């Protein structure tokens, strides 16, 4: 069966510090991968998605970036965090030949 | 107008009640529909997924899609306190990789 991992689970970072969140998927090949942010009391905001290694589509221009160095690995990064980057970051995957989307456990980021 | 509208609630019901959760949408190109359950501080869990119109049942859960009205529903029978969570609807068109989510309905089932 497929499993999606995210780490760390929680993170507290000062403003201006760098960020690296990692997501890996097990049990499937060539998944579509997604990064979302969920602010308190608000819906899911799509940040990036990737349909293959090195292929990244950005949905929201901001100080975040994403990379997909391996088929089942998706990384969210920032060089300098802003207070507004605080939120719940969710990684998700869908099969290349299916439409259901599955989410990871999330990373709660607090920028202080 | 948002592409997907969902009443934020909270919706409070007594244990054992039938719960009806709904979303409306404006894009007639949507063909794939999903319902997620999200507990506080957890990732969303996929509950039901359907393609095009019709009903799909899984245990106490029934998903219903009415494409002519651009309206989808999730019914929960014999609701339990453990069903207390936020329920998100999501949808997608064919030929696109992007999913559009509702903002979620918070459900409270009272023991």
Image: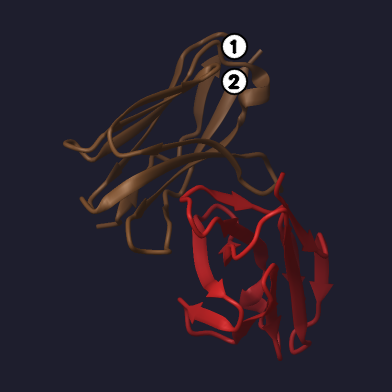
Chain colours: A red, B brown
Apparent side of residue B94 relative to residue B27 in the rendered image (left or right): right
Question: Is residue B96 visible from the viewing direction of this image?
Answer: yes
- Location of residue A48 with respect to A25 vertically, above or below: below
Element carrying mark 2: strand
Q: Which chain carries label 1?
A: B
- Location of residue B72 with respect to A50 vertically, above or below: above
Q: Residue at x 49, y 55 (%)?
A: A43
Q: Which chain carries label 2?
A: B
Closer to the camera, A54 or B98?
A54
Q: Which residue is drawn at 71% across and 48% down?
A: B41
Question: Is residue A111 visible from the viewing direction of this image?
Answer: no
Apparent side of residue A80 relative to residue B46 in the rendered image (left or right): right
- Location of residue B66 with respect to A76 vertically, above or below: above
Q: Where is residue B56 in the image (x, y as percent from the top left)?
A: 41, 25
Give the position of the C terminus of chain A as an image quadrant.
Answer: bottom right
Which corner quadrant of the image does residue A5 belong to? Answer: bottom right
Element carrying mark 1: loop
State yes or no: discs 1 and 2 in contact (Cβ < 8 Å): yes
Task: Give the residue at mark 1.
Answer: B15
Distance between the Cα atoms at labels 1 and 2? 6 Å
- Location of residue A84 with respect to A37 vertically, above or below: below
Task: Give the residue at mark 2.
Answer: B109
Q: Mark 1 packing: few (<14 Cα in 10 Å), some, or many (20+)?
A: some
Apparent side of residue A4 relative to residue A36 in the rendered image (left or right): right
Q: Mark 2 packing: few (<14 Cα in 10 Å), some, or many (20+)?
A: some
Residue B51's mark? none
């Amino acid at each position: 069966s497929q499993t999606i991992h995210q780490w760390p689970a929680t993170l507290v970072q000062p403003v201006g510090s760098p960020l690296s969140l990692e997501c890996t998927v097990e049990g499937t090949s060539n998944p579509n991968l997604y990064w979302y942010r969920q602010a308190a009391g608000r819906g899911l905001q799509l940040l990036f998605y990737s349909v293959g290694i090195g292929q990244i589509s950005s949905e929201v221009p901001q100080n975040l970036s994403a990379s997909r160095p391996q088929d089942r690995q998706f990384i969210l990064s920032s060089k300098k965090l802003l207070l507004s980057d605080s939120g719940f970051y969710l990684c998700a995957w869908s099969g290349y030949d299916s439409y259901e989307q599955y989410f990871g456990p999330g990373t709660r980021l607090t920028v202080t | 107008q948002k592409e997907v509208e969902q009443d934020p609630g909270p919706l409070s019901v007594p244990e054992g009640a039938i719960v009806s959760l709904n979303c409306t949408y404006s894009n007639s190109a949507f063909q794939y529909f999903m319902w997620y359950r999200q507990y506080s501080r957890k990732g969303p869990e996929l509950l039901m997924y359907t393609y095009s119109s019709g009903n799909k049942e899984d245990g106490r859960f029934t998903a219903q899609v009415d494409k002519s009205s651009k309206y989808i529903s999730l019914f929960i029978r014999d609701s339990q306190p453990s069903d207390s969570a936020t329920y998100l609807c999501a949808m997608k068109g064919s030929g696109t990789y992007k999913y559009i989510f509702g903002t979620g309905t918070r459900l409270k089932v009272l023991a």
